[in-house]
Image (cartoon, coloured by chain):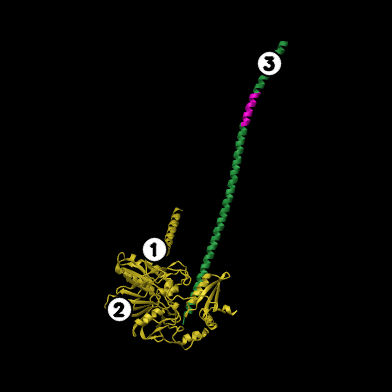
Chain colours: A green, B yellow
Amino acid sequence: MRKVYWIMAMLLAAGITLTGCATTGDLEKVQQREEQINAKADQALQKAEDANAAAAKAAEAAARAEQAARAAEEKAAKAEEEKAAMAEKAAKDEERAKKADVVFEKSMRK
Amino acid sequence: MCRNIFSITVLLLFILYLHGCAVVNHARLQYGQFPIQSEDKIGKNRFSVLKEDDVLGRLAVIRLKKGDTLPDVARHFGLGIKEISAANPDVDVWVPDGGRRIILPLSFTLPDAPRRGIVINLAAMRLFQFRGKGNSVSLTVWTYPVGIGSEERPTPLGETCVRRKIRRPTWHVPASIADDHRKKGDPLPDKVPPGPLNPLGEYALYLDKPGYLIHGTNKPASIGLKATNGCMRLYPENVKKLYENTPVKTPVFIVNQPYLIGRRGGVLYLEVHPALENSNAGELEKTFARLRKIEKRWNREIDWRKVEKAVAEARGIPVPVLELREGSMKEAAELVEIKHPGKFHGEPEVPELNMDAWYVLAAKEREEVDALRTAAMINHQGPPIPARVLPSGGGYRVLAGPFKNVSEAENAARRLKVDLGIDGVLIEPAGNE
């Protein structure tokens, strides 16, 4: 009977030992996976950060482009206004010159 | 869609092509290279012409300097104001840009009239005097610009002759002119003796039409304008020559031909002047009919694009429109450049500012160009009134003077009011304060 107990105890100890060995391997595997996942997460995070940075840059560029476009439009409108003002001035100058010529022609009479 | 884009592209290219043409012409005038010719080698008034030819002289260009005016350039080269301004339509008569090249229209087409005595084409505002024997192959032609009658009192057309000639004539003021002056508040005496105030100048040729004369002037800047009461005025230097070269009884033909067709050296030319108010509207159709007839006779194609352009622009320049002899056209288009003489003949002089003199403040302008124009117009009155521009407080003042005394200054102020509608303000000598 004592022998039986002893065998059973031995078996239990062997079972526990074996079970313990399996858990370490699993742990290592888990650790490995965790590391991999962490690395991937880091990568993903980096990617996400990169993407965010790129998006921010793009948004900034878009804003700048819009601003530039607005400035160009304003400049074009101003140039157009200036052109119109110049044309108006030229027309007025010409009119004044013509009036002066008429006055001069009259002044040349006897 | 593709077809539309193609059509638009073709249209754009065509527009660019036309624009290019204009730019090239302008660029050529401003930046092109022309052979330089000395001023005394280019004909101004005297030309020898073959009897079968109708076109005299040649076109030239000159580069202006700051302060030049077209009336001064015109007088120096024996041209009228309208001739030079029509040839250079985009140039300010009184304040042209310094450094700019302008055309001197020193080429003239003879009117369709007898080639003897004196022929005056009112549309061209130009007088031609023919000298030479009937049997020779060439004629000597003297030509001068003239001032002619206004719209209200036009110069009469037709044939007449020189009845008498008088040196230093007295001007007997006609009733109509006396009346005009009375209305303006500037009464005239019954007669004006020879001198600077006499509008007939130093020489007068009395025509057989009573009351009409060819004479000089005390207002040289009026040559090439419609500013007389029917008489024909010449520059003082031109009327002297005409007076010396014209015997009494010389026939005078007065015509009005805005469209002139002429030949020279294997090229057919068309010269167009702005039509006068009393011109016959059918003249243009008659000119086109004549051109078509010539085209048919020579069996060569006239450049109708050039014809239409010449008619539309009316620049008073003979335009080559048909090559009658191979290679002649190239020769016809050649221009020469004349060097600026430094000072133009008859250019008004403005004495230096004098603190002891009287002045008249004639105008205050914001723009310099307006002030310069007013000063130039005052300078070109007859007799001349000196005037200059002075910058003042962001604007410009036009100052007439110097005048020796108050009565001279008052007289100038009166003339400015009567002739130019300017209300001048008398300025005492600086020492009087």
Quadrant of the frame with the C terminus of chain B: bottom right
Tell me what residue is drawn at x 30 percent, y 66 percent: B325
Contact between marks 1 and 3 (CB within 8 A): the answer is: no
Q: How many marks?
A: 3
Circle 3 chain: A
Q: Earlier in the sequence, mark 1 or mark 2?
A: 1
Front residue of B73/B134: it is B73
For the magenta stretch, what is the residue range?
Answer: A23-35
**Label 1, on which residue?**
B33
Q: Hey, what amino acid is under mark 1?
A: Gln
Tell me what residue is drawn at x 47 percent, y 86 percent: B176
Q: Hey, what amino acid is under mark 2?
A: Gly
Front residue of B132/A96: it is B132
Q: Say whether residue A33 is magenta.
A: yes
Circle 2 chain: B
Nearer the observer, disc 3 or disc 2? 2
- Apparent side of residue B390 relative to residue A16 in the rendered image (left or right): left
**Label 2, on which residue?**
B132
Question: Magenta part mainly helix, strand or loop?
Answer: helix
Q: Which mark is residue A11?
A: 3
Q: CA distance from mark 1 to mark 3?
A: 119 Å
Hey, which quadrant is residue B262 in on the image?
A: bottom left
Is residue B335 visible in this depiction of the protein?
no
- Apparent side of residue B275 relative to residue B115 in the rendered image (left or right): right
Is residue B391 visible in this depiction of the protein?
yes
Nearer the observer, disc 1 or disc 2? 1
Secondary structure state at the residue bearing disc 1: loop
* Residue B173 placement (x, y as % from top left): 45, 87
Circle 1 chain: B
Tell me what residue is drawn at x 55 percent, y 75 percent: B363
Q: Residues within 10 Å of mark 3 (few under 14, many from 20)?
A: few
